[in-house]
Amino acid sequence: MISFTLPKWYDLHTHFRQGDVLPAYIQAHLDMGCAGALAMPNTKPPTAIVFDKDKSEYWSIERYMRDLRNAGGSKFQELVVPLYLTIDTTPDMIIEGAKSGILKACKYYPPHGTTGAEFGAPIDKYIENGIFTAMEVAGVILCIHGEEHGLSPDKYFDRSTNAEEIFYSTHMPIIRDKFPKLKIVCEHITTKTAVDFVSESSDKVAATVTPQHLIYTIGDLIQGLKYHLFCLPVLKHCEDRNALQAAVTAPDNTKFFAGTDSAPHSIKATKCGCAAGCFTGGIAPQLYAMSFELAGVDLSDQKSQDIFKNFLCLNGANFYNLPIPQENFTLVKQASPLKALKTSNGEVMPLPLGLGMDILPWAIQN
């Protein structure tokens, strides 16, 4: 039986939501060996100011952090909430927040590009209004949902291009070159184009990769319309998945790391469409192990285990300057049953269970 021990890890892109459901979602992350998390700020209203003292209709990072800690997040070693960039964000807000130590990252959402992204502004806004300059000076990390917004359907997802490829071919080279000291995390990348951009850039540019984008392709989603696989950015093609697998399993990988984008929904299929997001809380290390095996990696081998450890536990912590936890957890190659997560808003379906898979081949021992 394959078994290997890892330091606890940080999920550097996840959604905990808000309100009564918080404890269940936080506990699911604690159960899968997380020492901390980067909690997305697309709350309602968005977490778009830093301090409670700055009276606003927006939530503050201080307020959301307080809610997270009170709901069980105090058990995390580290907890980061990025500032949601809006048209109301100012350079002074960035500088003051960074000086306080509360502001460590900012999140760019393409307008209406995903759940809760209606407060975002076009990327050029932040290039021109001093926000990225202030972030570069203050050492605040830019977390970026890299998709072009406002595209017609034939450009959003076409045989020859898509919203992510357009974004990484046009905007990202400009941002990287104009702000060379700005640390950038290209979040939940899905295309070979994005992989190539990160690989060719300096060590100031890194990327998170989700379990679903390492395992599945667009064919898995649309064959039978398996809506539990619907997330944004949407799954791509075999060439893209292969590029992602090659990046995360490379022996010298230091730039690509774990960020699940776990997004719980008690109702996936709605009257107006399908809610975007795959729930992988509680099972992400197991899914990442499955993705490594799918890529041909033998996790019984020590060198392969070290590569997995770099991806899951070390690369992200190093990029965000977070301490490597002293506590460990163990991954074991043994059958592990899946069940829905019960919350105050109803049951939330883990991704594999939504696809008809009720037994995982890997288990966690904390």
Image: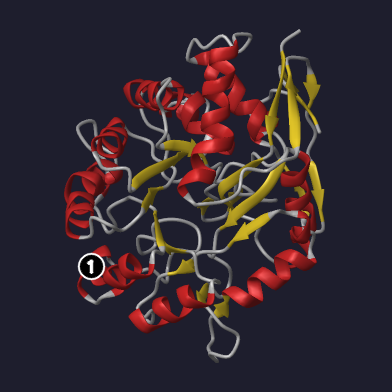
Image quadrant containing the N terminus: top right
Where 349 falls versus 152 (above or below)? above
In this rendering, does residue 93 appear at all?
Answer: yes
Q: Position of residue 307 (x, y in %)?
A: 51, 22
Query: Toward the viewer: 203 or 89?
Result: 203
Query: Toward the viewer: 105 or 216?
Result: 105
Q: Position of residue 87 (x, y in %)?
A: 35, 78
- At mark 1, the secondary structure is helix
Q: Residue at x 49, y 51 (%)?
A: 320
Q: Position of residue 76 (x, y in %)?
A: 72, 54
Query: Toward the viewer: 258 or 147?
Result: 258
Q: Position of residue 160 (x, y in %)?
A: 19, 32
Where 127 falls versus 339 (above or below)? below
Query: Does residue 129 appear to the left or right of 254 in the view shown?
Result: left
Image quadrant containing the C terminus: top right
Which residue in the structure is indicated by mark 1?
127
- Residue 208 found in image quarter: top left
Q: Amino acid at mark 1?
A: Ile
Q: Residue at x 79, y 22 (%)?
A: 336
- Residue 133 found in image quarter: bottom left
Query: Toward the viewer: 279 or 124?
Result: 124
In this rendering, does residue 225 appear at all?
Answer: no
Q: Residue at x 55, y 51 (%)?
A: 275
